[in-house]
Amino acid sequence: MADSCPPWCADAFEQSLAAARTRGVQDVEVILAAGSSALTRFANNAIHQNVSETARHLSVRVIVEGRTARASTNRLDPDGIREVVEQAIGITRLTEPDPDLPPLAEPAPYPSVQRHFEATARATPEERALAVAEAIRAVEGAGQTAAGIYSTGESAFALLNSRGVAAWHSETMARFSITAMAPDSSGWAKASACYHGDLDPLALAVSAAQKANASRHPRELPAGRYTVILEPAAVLDLAGQMFGDFSATAIRDGRSFLNDRIGQKIFGDNIRIHDDATHPLQAGAPFDGEGVPRRPLTLVESGAPRDIAYCRHAAALAGVEPTGHGFPLPNEYGEAPANIVIAGGESSLAEMIASTGHGVLVTRLWYIREVDPYEKIFTGMTRDGTFLVEDGRVTAGLRNFRFNQGLMEMLSNVELLGTPVRASGEEAFDMVVPAMKIGNFNFTEVTRF
Amino acid sequence: MKDLALRALDALARRGVSYADVRAIESREREITTKNGKAGHVSSSDSIGIGMRVVAAGCWGFAATDDLTGAGIDRCAALALAIARASAAAKKEDVALAPEQSYRAVWSSPCRIDPFSIPVDRQLGALLAVDAELRHNPATSLAEASMHFERRRQVFASTLGSLIDQTRVMSGAGFSALCYKDGEIQRRSFPNSFGGQYQLKGYELVEELDLLAHAPRIAEEAAALHAAEQCPEGEFDLILDSSQLGLQIHESIGHPIELDRVLGSEANYAGMSFLTLDQLNRLRYGSEIVNVVCDARLEHGPGLGTFAFDDEGVPAQSIDIIRGGLFTGYMTSRETAAAIGETRSNGCMRADGWARLPLIRMTDVSLLPGEQSLEEVFSGDGIYMETNRSWSIDDKRYNFQFGCEIGWEIKNGRRVRMLKNPSYSGISTEFWNACSAIAGREHWTLWGVPNCGKGQPEQVMGTGHGASPARFHNIKIGSAYGG
């Protein structure tokens, strides 16, 4: 894959620039995105939806006398490009000038990452179908019903501007997830990787089927406070809800729970969290939506929030350097960390279970929503593999719980940490996180299954 | 667009498929937001592309492209077919579809004022005026306002011979005031949270909402919540405003009646449903005054789920979902209707664009107006809640919990004190069976939910939900802050 913008990107940029200059506009930023992705979906032990999409996208932003706006299209022919530039200039001229609007970004070196794998980009429908068929057989063989997805695809993102920025990133991504269902129980497993050969669909299917089998005839435990063991996907989906608040703009707006808490010890000593775009288990571009290189951040050190992300505007207001976490302009949200790595410990999941006298093992959380934005309380449900742990052993499946849990309290009660892995859930973007054993977790209700 | 659709259909048909349909879609969107006295986001977006769906070898295949050259369409058609054939590697039985007729139609949603004819500076000016009014209150930390417009033209063609050309115009607008003070964040929104109100209308919707007139009250309430008492925990009679009730309908009725969920198609992501097939025409879903329809027809109102034909070429219909409290119907597609022995789909298949496959999606799922006056709904004691703040429900749609932006204690039919951080929870059928009063037609509003997620890859769809304020007896309140 090319290390720099391919010709079609450079051509689209040059055409955009020429169209803008013809209309007297000098400051032009272009974002180009392209991708193709395919997803094979199965349910009731058969493939039932099998799709593919291919698309390209051109987005143009201009700056005219302190004003800016953005226009986008997927028509990349000469007329389409000319029209989107005219549209961008037209709406920009109708907006209000912003004295704080940053100029276009300047060129900068970007960290090197290699996240594109040709074999994944070229994975065929047959390849996915055969892997799915094998996974289904494993679940069906256990007397259960399988549902899930196997997706593969490639995407590319370029940001170019009239000051010479020419940022380009391409990557591939594959995801496999599976739910195995028995008459009164279920189990789930999911993984993602830039190279699809790193996924093991059969192993994930076997794991989901084992969970469904082990949680048969679930018992009902009353709501209350319990020691919980959250597997990595559950940690990701819940802890992942707070990182949008590690943002200078969110703090300035008063919408962050870190207002008046930076530097204070709000989590346990054992909580260390980084943002690292170059981590080998991470994905994504090494630059942000403004074309600024992503810098590593220490978001939490020994339980205290330390660094926050700054877009160029927020950085200028604070008198610091931007961190490379800005969203494409114009936007009202500023910035957010995007490559979270939560440091782990030495404990295996088996050790966490073995050390628990009475607790709950959680595979997956679901429908997580914020209850209180400053206390950072979230509600949600357990799902697809919730187990009772007694005297160091998993002894039964459990009916699913609703939780209402404050994240500051939760991350102050972490007793054991596992090895960080690339985790993939459904409620937050993929992160590198460990399993956690947590005391005093707040389950408030029990549902019917 | 018609030529494009027919060319794509021909590219599929000549490859020997047992069924095919295509959707050529051209859309334009405009989004304008303001934040604390400045433009936040001003953008315009155009998109054109085509999605092709086929049945071959007894399996579905789908491919989409924005390469609309002859070669691009041929490649996409070949890929759709290859995907269908690959699906046969894990097939249990051939796809079977309920029969449907062939239609030729041209339809546009009513739109009195084209939102794209209004200059951006006028729309921005209207939002900045609201913003200034919100910040006139010194307690306001963050003022946000937004407008969103979309025009989408879709040409559907199928091997049944249908050729359907539909254009829908959607508008949305709203604002919020956030107040951060003394270690607490409170927010109020108008006319609804998460972007305001959305309907299948033109710019006339923005004019009808009269945003500016409501800004002072909303800013005042956001500030006043800091001094309000915490909503108590316990069992109380609950009165919901129509916007919160709209979301309650969405989560605890709308999603469970999707027949693809019931049959397991969504099990890995969105989940399944407690409404198993044996419950139809047997389950006492609500009290006798609860009547719910799923109605995509224009007669129901300008909802985000209003259209003339769904994305399988099935005409818009009205379906009784709950009649006199009894569960009477699911939302279906041609495939799921056939699976349960129905003779026809009731027309609920929609995709969120040309790149995605149609799924069963809520159209306008509404609680019909009741016969009580607003005074009767508020009579006696209870807690009144307004405007959604959080929502969560389990993957079979039994156990839910909602939080609202603001509450009031009601004594003898009157608001006696403001309550902050109100929340309530329950089990779907128990909740609807506790419905004891529903206000009449004059208080009924058709709300738009623009951000309903479903499917893998996920699709975001707009749905409509009509409701009047209603009362529910002995509901569990306040557990979000319990424990």
Image (tube, grey):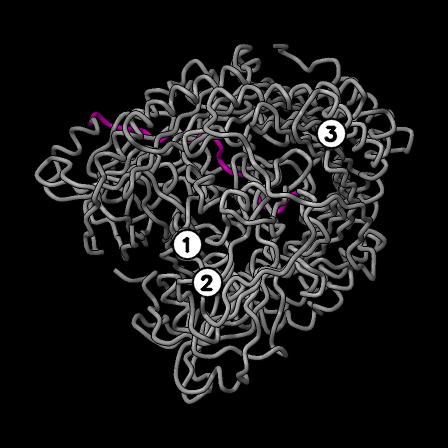
Residue under pointer 2: B327
Q: Position of residue B289 (x, y in %)?
A: 48, 76
Q: Position of residue A72 (x, y in %)?
A: 74, 36
Q: CA distance from mark 2 to mark 1?
A: 9 Å
Looking at the rendered structure, the secondary structure element under dot 2 is: strand
Viewer-proximal residue among B102 and A394: B102
What subunit carries mark 3? A
Residue under pointer 3: A58
* Left or right of residue B368: residue B7: right
Identify which amino acid the numbered label 2 is placed on.
Answer: Phe
B332 inside magenta stretch:
no
What subunit carries mark 2? B
Check whether the beta carbons of the residues at disc 3 and disc 1 lie within 8 A of each other: no
The quarter of the displayed image where residue A169 is located: top right
| Number of the label disc, if any, that sits on residue A370 | none
* Residue for point 57% across, 71% down: B368
Few, some or many C-alpha atoms within 10 Å of disc 3 (few <14, some 14-19, many ≥20)?
many
Nearer the observer, disc 3 or disc 1? 1
Query: Relative to B132, is B40 above or below?
Result: above
- Which residues lie in the magenta part? A331-347
What subunit carries mark 1? B
Check whether the beta carbons of the residues at disc 2 and disc 1 lie within 8 A of each other: yes
The quarter of the displayed image where residue A31 is located: top right
Viewer-proximal residue among A171 and A274: A171
* Residue for point 38% across, 63% down: B429
| Number of the label disc, if any, that sits on residue B275 | 1
Looking at the rendered structure, the secondary structure element under dot 3 is: strand
Few, some or many C-alpha atoms within 10 Å of disc 1 (few <14, some 14-19, many ≥20)?
many
Identify which amino acid the numbered label 3 is placed on.
Answer: Leu
The quarter of the displayed image where residue B72 is located: top right
Q: CA distance from mark 3 to mark 1?
A: 44 Å
